[in-house]
Image (tube, rainbow, N blue to C red):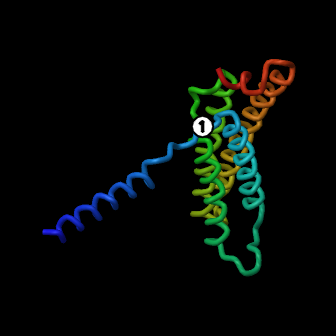
Amino acid sequence: MIVYIVVAVVIVLGLFAAYRSLGGSQAAEVDGVALIHRAARAMADAAAALESASGESTIAPGTTVDDGGRALRSQVEGAAQLVEQVDAGQLSSAGRDANALLRTAALELRWAVRLQATHPTPESAGMERAIGELLTHSRRCIQSAQKLLGESVAGAEEGHGAAQSLVE
């Protein structure tokens, strides 16, 4: 009988310890303004990497097409996931517009990476144009988003407060 009591106490203590370790902390609140600025920089870096990779006809020594494509895909996906983490409800009108532009750019960069990965040396001019147009439009979206974010930061420096200009 004593064995059952000891086992029950050990189980209760184990459950209590698991509850404390797993459920004890709350997730930190994400700063939407800082996140959208990081997302814009990450998207610009990913677009630049993709543009430089699409202009290269040779592969660096020691790497394969898969190695370069995998690294590029993960960079684009990382930037796209940053954009997806932004809570647009926290942002002002300019912030929401910038978020929408960055989401569009992320979608287009994802498609450009996929097309480039499946056709590393395009046989057709149409495929090259498609990748080029995706890159061009995503770059325009990123630049427009950065302009919107820059205007909101410039407005904040005039006395409105940095957090106040992008957050309602």
**In this rendering, position of residue 24 left or right of residue 157:** left
Looking at the image, which residue is at 77% across and 52% down?
48
Q: Quadrant of residue 138?
A: top right
Task: Please provide percent x and percent y for residue 4.
Answer: 17, 67
Q: Residue at x 65, y 49 (%)?
A: 79
Is 92 rendered above or below residue 18? Answer: above
The residue to which callout 1 is attached is 86
- Which quadrant, please, contains the N terminus? bottom left
Point out residue 56 in the picture as x, y percentages from the top left corner.
Answer: 77, 65
Identify the residue shown where x is 22% and y is 62%: 8
Relative image position of residue 165 (x, y in whole percent): 74, 22
Residue 111, above or below 122: above
Residue type, label 1: Val
Residue sitting at the far front: 2
Question: Which quadrant is the C terminus positioned in?
Answer: top right
The residue lying at 60 percent from left, 27 percent from top is 90
Q: Nearer the viewer, residue 123 or 42?
A: 42
In terms of secondary structure, where does tag 1 sit?
loop
